[in-house]
Amino acid sequence: MKRIERNEVLGLADYETIRERFRARVVSDKKRRRVQLGPHVTVLFENRDTVLLQIQEMLRTERITRPGAVQHEIDTYNDSVPGDDELSCTLMIAIVDAVERETFLQAAVGFEDCVSLVVQGERIAAQSAARDGATSERTTAVHYVKFALPRPLADRIRAVRAVDTAPAPVRVELRVDHPSYTAGIVLPAETLLELAEDLRE
């Protein structure tokens, strides 16, 4: 999948003219790209549009206009754009109570190393992007991971089409197997269709 280029990112004034339509479309797409992994973790599978929205909204919120600062945001968020035969997702740990959340984050050190995608029974370990906030004593509430798929498995997902009916032509399960948190979800058909489209780009 092609990374976001500078000429695709609009200035603040130009973005305001299309923001409502663009944001509404991407938010609608995110509903099919988001899954719940156990009681505390929400997962969003990223693509160019979700990343571009993140960039534009960050520039808007922080009123970033300097060319170097704009490029820094593009470079940072481009890490979430999946490459060839690759899937990318953001995992968000959400616990309302601050004390409970901090206790969990301390207990879940190494969380990102325990995430995997199981495609047709073959396990692919997540590759985690290093971000600020994680230490040897606590993990972070947000994790950015990618899955490098062997070509045959990528082809199986890539071949999924909207006309396919149950049972799903390929079984894809997202899992986390950490001593403090174990959960798994078989991706629903609508999410699988989104990922198939990602892999075809």
Image (cartoon, helix red, strand yellow):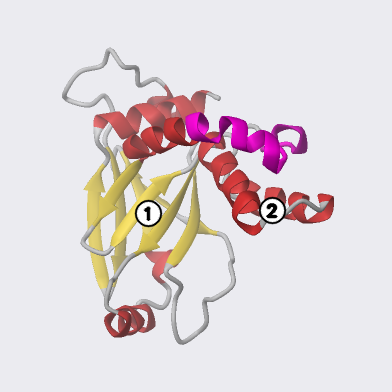
The residue lying at 76 percent from left, 38 percent from top is 6
Q: Is residue 15 magenta?
A: yes
Frontmost residue, 54 versus 154: 54
SS at mark 1 in the image: strand
Viewer can see residue 105: yes
- Report the disc number at residue 116: 1
Q: Is residue 141 left or right of residue 185?
A: right
Image: magenta residue range = 4-22
| Disc 1 residue crowd, few under 14, some 14–19, many 20+, Cα 10 Å | many
Residue tagged 2:
73
Rendering coords of residue 88 (x, y %): 49, 45
SS at mark 2 in the image: helix
Q: Upstream in the sequence, badge 1 or badge 2?
A: 2
- Dividing the picture into quarters, in which one does residue 38 lie? bottom left
Q: Is residue 136 magenta?
A: no
- Residue 146 position (above or below residue 20): below
